[in-house]
Image (tube, rainbow, N blue to C red):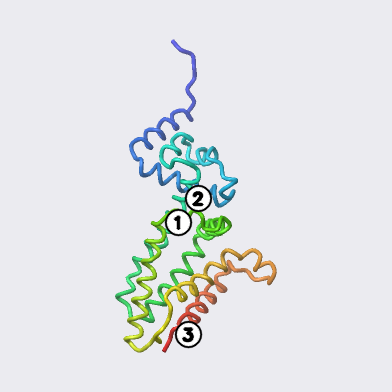
Amino acid sequence: MSDSIVSPGTHEQERGRRTRKNNPEKTREDILQAAIIEFVQQGLAGARVDAIAERTATSKRMIYYYFGSKEQLYCECLVKLYGDIRKTEQSLDLESLPAEQAIRRLVEFTFDHHDRNVDFVRIICTENIHYGEYVKQSPVIREMSSLVLQALGNTLQRGVQEGVFRAGIQVIDLHMLMSAFCFYRVSNRHTFGEIFQIDLLDDDIKQRHKAMICDAVLGYIRA
C-alpha cells in the first residue's frame, strides 16, 4: 500500500484537464482572456507564455497547440477585442431608428464601450507602438470593421433623405471623430487627469463628456 499523499490541488488540476479536454472552445477563450491581461500589462515583447499558462492553470504546450506562437496568440487577442466591439455595434439595430437617434445611439455606445473596456484601449496602444504590424496580418479585423462603416454610411444617407443631415460627409472622417474622443479620454486619462486635475472616472464628468461628443458629432453632420 502506497503511503504517498495526493494534495487537493492535484484533484483540481485533474478536473481542469478534463474540463479543457471536454470543452476546447472554453479552453481557447480562457487562454485568450488570460493572454489579453498579460499583453496589456507587459506588452508584446515582455509578455511570457509561461505566465499566460499559469493564469489558466494550463501548459505552454496546450497554448502552442491552440495558437502556434506568442505572436499568433497576440494577433488572436486583437481579433477578439475588435470582434467584441463590432459584434455589439451590429446588435444596436440602427436601421429601426430615425437617423439622428441612430447616430446618437452609436456615439453613446462607442463612449461606453471604451470607458468600460480599458484593456481594449491599452492593447490598441500597444499595437500602434508596433505600427499596426499584427493588424496588417489579420484581414478578419478589416472585414469586421468595414461593417460599422457600412452601417454608419447607411445611417448618414437616411439622414440626408430625411433632411436632417447634410450631404458630402466622409464616413471614415465621422467614424474617426466619434472614436477619437472616446479613445483619448481613456488612453490618456492618467496624464490628462493629473496635468489638468480632472477625474475622468467621475460619473458626472463622464455624462458631461458623453453629451458633449454626441452634440459635437451631430453638430458636424446636421443639415
Residue drawn at the location 38% of the way across and 61% of the way down = 144
Query: In the rendering, at what x and y percent does residue 128 appear?
Result: 55, 59
Q: How many marks?
A: 3
Residue drawn at the location 38% of the way across and 68% of the way down = 148
Classify mark 1: residues with Cα within 10 Å, few (<14), some (14-19) or many (20+).
many
Observer-nearest of 130 and 51: 130
Q: Can you identify the residue that label 3 sits on?
A: 219
Residue drawn at the location 35% of the way across and 71% of the way down = 150
Q: Amino acid at mark 2?
A: Ile
Task: Estimate the spatial distance between the alpha carbons at disc 1 and disc 3, rounded to whole Å.
Answer: 30 Å
Q: Can you identify the residue that label 1 sits on?
A: 81
Query: In the rendering, at what x and y percent does residue 121 appear?
Result: 53, 60
Query: In the rendering, at what x and y percent does residue 120 appear?
Result: 50, 58
Q: Quadrant of residue 101?
A: bottom left
Q: Helix, strand, or loop for circle 2? A: helix
Q: Can you identify the residue that label 2 sits on?
A: 36
Task: Estimate the spatial distance between the alpha carbons at disc 1 and disc 2, rounded to whole Å.
Answer: 9 Å
Q: Quadrant of residue 209?
A: bottom right
Pointer 1 with pointer 2, Cβ within 8 A: yes
